[in-house]
Amino acid sequence: MSAIIEARGLGRDYEVGGGMFSKPGVVRAVAETSFSVSAGKTLAVVGESGCGKSTLARLVTMIEEPTSGTFLLDGETVTPDRWADLRTHVQIVFQDPYGSLNLRQRVGQILEEPLKINRRGMSAAERRAKAREMMRLVGLREEHYDRYPHMFSGGQRQRIAVARALMLEPKLLVLDEPVSALDLSIQSQILNLLNDLQTRLNLAYLFISHDLSVVRHVADEILVMYLGRPVEFGPKDEIFDAPRHPYTKALISATPSADPRNRRERIKLVGELPSPLAVPPGCPFSPRCWKAQDKCRRDRPIMEGTPHPAACFYPEA
């Protein structure tokens, strides 16, 4: 199965600080990140806050240009001069459905706007018909067309955001924490909706989340990131049942389980997350890792090799 998107060594640096007598520092928000996502499949990107998940989303959706590396969309290399043509193939659903919608526009206007900008040949009647069709697809009613976003619940607003993202018939949806702002009862409804839409439309999903309980429900493969770098990649079941990187094992140990018989020993990481302006030499995780040895503090492990690789010199059995 061919990949909808394929990233090769993506990286994004930012200059911060600096002044009259000092040079600016460099934050490597994303570095050496490679992955691919096929149609009908979901790749989940997980990690602590500050690990580079949202920066990666901005690179994939062509909001920001990578500092290094490249990515291909449907087999074509993505370059800034082609962003205008390729953006219609990749759409994003943001974390906060209230903040991502224009409160001064009615739902119909919100849904029709992408068509006005990108489908100039469509008539007003065609745009209205397309918007109403998409509303039905995401579970909204006809009478919602002329209402404003503030008149809806959080779950309904996220349905509007999903409908807007689908108006241009994209091949890839980037879902940036799409249910973390919703109540638990509503989360399951939106996740089931996304699963149904993926099956109907054969969409590829890049699902960004810190909630591994949600990830286990939706993902086919998982990419674990730490301080901007991938540290483990593999099929969902292998990641959860046999994590190889100590960081992944610690994340999974902190995931609540609804089954009282499935109790894990919680791994509490010692120390704070290092500053991205002063990433430790060697393995970035070594200051917090209970398995770290001199080699870990001196050399940086590379994630390569097996179908379930981990960037660790002493991976879990």
Image (tube, rainbow, N blue to C red):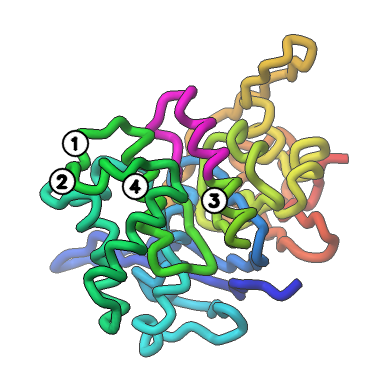
In the drawing, what numbered circle is on residue 150?
1
Q: Is residue 317 left or right of residue 290?
A: right
Q: Earlier in the sequence, mark 1 or mark 2?
A: 2
In the drawing, what numbered circle is on residue 160?
4
Q: Earlier in the sequence, mark 3 or mark 2?
A: 2
Q: Earlier in the sequence, mark 3 or mark 1?
A: 1
Q: Is residue 277 visible?
A: no
Instruction: Determine if the magenta segment contains residue 182.
Output: yes
Q: Quadrant of residue 240?
A: top right
Q: Earlier in the sequence, mark 3 or mark 4?
A: 4
Q: Are marks 4 and 2 in contact (CB under 8 Å)?
A: no
Q: Which residue does the image show at 31% across and 78% down from the upper left? A: 119
Badge nearest the viewer, 3 or 4: 4
Q: Mark 1: which secondary structure?
A: helix
Say which of 286 and 69 sits in front.
Answer: 69
Q: Mark 4: which secondary structure?
A: helix
- Dot 4 amino acid type: Ile
Badge nearest the viewer, 3 or 1: 1
Give the distance between the C-alpha atoms of the residues marked 3 and 4, in whole angstroms: 18 Å
> Height in image: 67 above or below 142?
below
Q: Which residue is mark 2?
A: 103
Q: Which residue is mark 3?
A: 207
